[in-house]
Amino acid sequence: MIWLTYRQHRGQVLVMSGLLAALGVMFLVSWLEASAFVASHAGMGGGDLDAALSERYQTVYTLFGWLPIVAPALIGVFWGAPLLGRELERGTHQLVWTQGVTPRRWLAVKLSVLGGLVALGGLAMSAMVSAWRPLFRTDTFGNIGIFNMLGVEPVAWWVFALMLGTAAGAVLRRTLPAMAVVVGVLAVMTFALFSASDHYATPTRVVTAEASFEQDARLVSRAWVDPAGVEIAAPPAGVCPRPLVWGERAQLAHERCLVGKGYRYVFYVHGPEMFWRFQLTDAAILLAGAGLLGWLTVRRVP
């Protein structure tokens, strides 16, 4: 049964391996080139160097912006959705499930083998990004795109996507509708988990005269503290004159006036020390969801 599973899905395995290999080559080439660039610009300040790298490797950063959603979606669409959806749609399950292997054993072996391969693919993605990232000094916690490609996040997302596609195919009994469900649910889950992460821990309260907080951190909310030390949602109108034309520069000048009169910013943030707590919490939620989807799939199989 394991050999049959490999023979039936070797095309998908080869495509995933090829895409991971292509990403690995891109990371390696950009890392080697960036290393030479950094060495030749050793006199530049950290901020200027980061800006230069960002401009030079904008294409890589753009790809990073899409990978956290696209990679799991590909797994759900091309691995999960056809697994049962195609069999049920074409009626081939009536033959497959009468060959001496019970439907649930057939499903268990398929999900175990494919789930293991998907988990290995997620680990490979995490390892490549972990090796590539330090040179570019990109945020690991505050940047949700990078965060979702480090640690155990890729494994959890990819396994969840596989189970989501399989469950959608089992329920809808059609491949294309199941694919559409995968894309929609993954998009919603990405933003839902990001919003829910505000509640994984009690945020740290930071009072400062600066208009920004620590870069590699997640902002939960912001407020003000008046000169008497009382926290308020916003300074009273009239403390500083409001400009006639409101824009970014005008807002900054207005806030500087407020700071000059004793008001301070209040930021509630999650700092980078919460990296693994957030990683493991996200993974637990996603894997629990994958387990529920697996249960639903088994219930749909006779």
Image (cartoon, grey):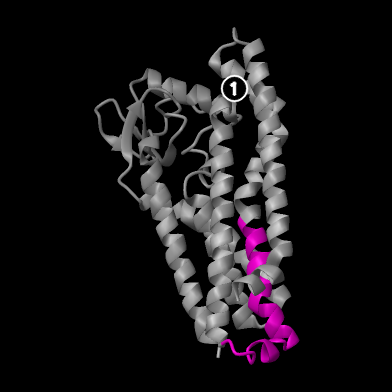
Figure quadrant of the C terminus: bottom right
Q: Is residue 292 above or below residue 142?
A: below
Residue 138 coordinates in the image, percent (x, y): 55, 31
Amino acid at the residue labelled 1: Asp
Residue 271 coordinates in the image, percent (x, y): 38, 36
Residue at the location (53% across, 49% down)?
A: 123
Q: Which stretch appears magenta?
A: 72-101
Q: Mark 1: few, some, or many residues within 10 Å (few <14, many ≥20)?
A: some
Residue at the location (66% across, 74% down)?
A: 4
Residue 152 coordinates in the image, percent (x, y): 47, 50
* 179 or 154: nearer the viewer: 154
Residue at the location (49% across, 25% down)?
A: 254
User: Under tag 1, what secondary structure?
Assistant: helix
| Residue 62 visible to an observer of this rendering | no
Q: Quadrant of residue 35?
A: top right
Residue at the location (58% across, 59% down)?
A: 118
Predominant secondary structure, magenta span: helix
| Residue that label 1 marks | 50
Q: Is residue 87 above or below residue 51?
A: below
